[in-house]
Amino acid sequence: MSFGVPFFPQEASSEAGHVDALFYTLLAFAVVLGLSLTGLVVGYAVKYRVGSPADRTGRRSRTMALEIAWTTASLIIAFIFFGWGAVLFVRREHPPADALEITGLGKQWMWEFRHPGGQREINELHVPVGKAVVVSLAAQDVIHSFYVPAFRIKQDAVPGRTTHIWFIATEPGRYHLFCAQYCGTQHSEMGGWVTVMAPEQYTSWLNGQGEGDTLAASGEKLFRALGCSGCHGAGSKVRAPVLEGIFGRPVALANQQTVIADERYLRDSILNPNKEIAAGYEPVMPSFDGLIDEGELQMLLAYLKSLSPRPSAGTKT
Ligand SMILES: [Cu+2]
């Protein structure tokens, strides 16, 4: 629905049409409302201009029915737009369960992406056409924002959190990628391109990136190198919870609460282990805050998630 006007970027994702439909409807509504109000203002200004023969006796009439009608109509219209926006918001919060999960890390001043197979790219993101992709975002330093206008998606990457955005690219091509949150002197240069390719091309592109560890395998190496396995591994002397299958499972805490072990929980368990102590264990796990960077944390999370049989996408922080 671009009306052939070059002001709006191409619609190249599953979300673009939905967002544009709402946007253009709101725009049309605002134009109609704006024009009719302007018409009334101008009309009355002309009618009651100085010296005009209009009736100025000032009789007042008030129709209750009319008052109620326009108030109710405005309320209903406002709620229609609210409901429409809410439906799109909920949709945006729930990626399809089979989505391909790519990690994105924002840092001053570049975007670094990692594919599940461990392939890494900077300021470039290759994705297959027609397949749901969820980008799970983290920030190394300050708030950045992952923004692809042609997909009509934008999501902040916030330090200390994992956030998500998903899309299905619908047209092969190259699309601008930006950081949409002012993040320092070279903010304007923080961006690049999303390349949407046919699935076979995407596969051969992945294969052409050279052999390397998958994201989860890099995470497993870190898990050993950082000494996590010394406590959490089988046969360890320290009593520490087994991490197999932890992702997505309810965990009983020492304070009697139960939480779901989502990305938020795993992240906090590693960076701030004393915040939530697993029931039945001593709070002896050291904090890894400052010892690992966000990229390494993403690898550890990928590893911990790979220990769970269920599909890892589709969960929210
Ligand atoms: Cu930025």
Image: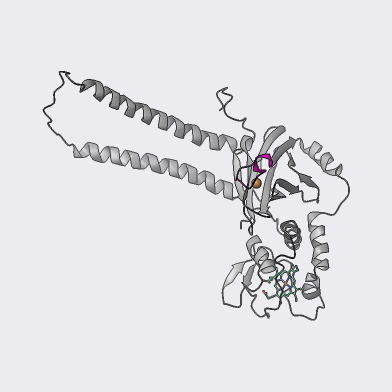
Instruction: Based on the picture, tell me whether residue 182 belongs to the magenta stretch.
Output: yes
The part of the chain drawn in magenta is 179-190
Q: Is residue 35 above or below residue 158?
A: above
The x and y percentages for residue 242 are 74, 72
Q: Is residue 316 above or below residue 269?
A: above
Q: Nearer the viewer, residue 121 or 305?
A: 121
Q: Nearer the viewer, residue 302 or 125?
A: 125
The x and y percentages for residue 76 are 36, 41
The residue positioned 54% from the left and 37% from the top of the image is 19
Figure quadrant of the C terminus: bottom right
Answer whether residue 95 is visible to the viewer in this image.
no
Answer whether residue 120 is visible to the viewer in this image.
yes
The residue positioned 70% from the left and 46% from the top of the image is 109
Q: Quadrant of residue 197?
A: top right
Instruction: Based on the picture, tell me whether residue 215 belongs to the magenta stretch.
Output: no
> Predominant secondary structure in magenta?
loop
Q: Nearer the viewer, residue 294 or 290?
A: 290
